[in-house]
Image (spheres, rainbow, N blue to C red):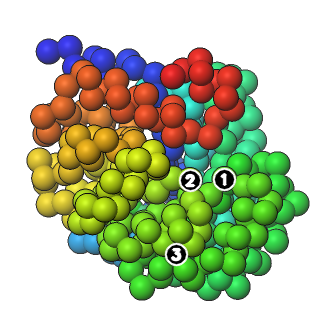
Amino acid sequence: DRLPALLEAMPKAELHIHIEGSLEPELMFRLAERNGVALPYPSVEALRAAYAFKDLQSFLDIYYAGASVLRTEQDFHDMAWAYLVKAAQEHVVRAEIFFDPQTHTARGVEMGTVVAGLSGALERARRELGVSCDLILCFLRHLSEEDAFQTLEQALPYRDRFIGVGLDSSERGHPPEKFARVFARCRELGLHLVAHAGEEGPPEYIRSALDVLHVERIDHGVRCVEDPALVRRLAEQRVPLTVCPLSNVKLCVFSRMEDHNLGQLLARGLVATVNSDDPAYFGGYLNQNFQACFEALPLDATHAWQLASHSFEASFADAADKRRWH
Ligand code: ES4
Ligand code: ZN
């Protein structure tokens, strides 16, 4: 069976990766020691053993605690560089990388430190690894819109270091409408717009992400299948969904990979893509996501080609690069 080799070797874009979710326990412990930060776990093994999540919130609690070891520009550089080396090995030729500045600025880390560390690693990856890559700033939806506006203000001196904004963190009870004004401002600024919707939240959140926030892609979006009219609209308008199979199983959105609806999404004509979300927490980088869902679902080489093609179509790379890969 040559499918695993095809999945591994095919050039692809990763469009849904939280850089703080790429922080491996080994690096987390090294940074904790370097910065004199105490971790509430005695060892790498004990930390990994705590990665048993029952839902999105139980994951986010551990994910935000893990990010507390990140203090200096070098820390942010080291984390992003480690991800980009891995991505290049997996034949990721384009990466659009989320970061959560509020997780850091709330602890007293300057926006400039975060952005300089991350964007320095991306610049190095373009040069040394030949990976095309850009940053997308995410607002934390469990915080207020006022807080998001302040974060945007702090980021504007670095406007040329990120290509868009997203919306992540606890979905239920924090509908897209809560961020209508700040997304309108970002739209005026010419930023690309995306939002997590329909991961744990209802299909209505996908609709309002499109109609109220005017996003260009939906992150996750798997719950769209509960609303057939919405599925038809997403297909007709070719709105991409950045699906994260291992994440969905680890956070109990689907109980087993065999139950994942990726195959249905493709069969209904949706521009679905495969992504890793938080690879250090969910058991694998991009290729392991491909391998896991192709093992569990009735997907073949045609689907593999389709998913890679969708990833380039859905990307915010410049037109010349997209034509070259597509
Ligand atoms: C996230 Cl899986 C997921 N969902 C929402 N927000 C997030 N931040 C990091 N991973
Ligand atoms: Zn995500």
Front residue of 88 and 40: 88
Residue at figure coordinates x 69%, y 78% from the top left: 181
Q: Left of 270 or right of it: where is 102?
A: right
Q: How far apart are the two marked residues, 2 and 3, measured between alpha carbons? A: 14 Å
Mark closest to the chain's N terminus, 1 or 2: 1
Q: Residue furthest top?
A: 2
269 to 106, vertically: above or below: above
The disc placed on residue 192 is 1
Residue at figure coordinates x 66%, y 48% from the top left: 135
Quadrant in which residue 247 is drawn? bottom left
Q: Is mark 1 within 8 Å of ligand 2?
A: no
The disc placed on residue 176 is 3
Which secondary structure lies at badge 2?
A: loop
Which x, y percent locates residue 277?
42, 52
Is residue 142 visible in the rendered structure shown here? yes
Q: Are marks 1 and 2 in contact (CB under 8 Å)?
A: yes
Which x, y percent locates residue 171?
42, 75
> What residue did someone put label 2 on?
216
Q: How far apart are the two marked residues, 1 and 2, measured between alpha carbons? A: 7 Å
Callout 1 crowding tier (Cα within 10 Å): few <14, some 14–19, many ≥20: some
Quadrant in which residue 303 is drawn? top left
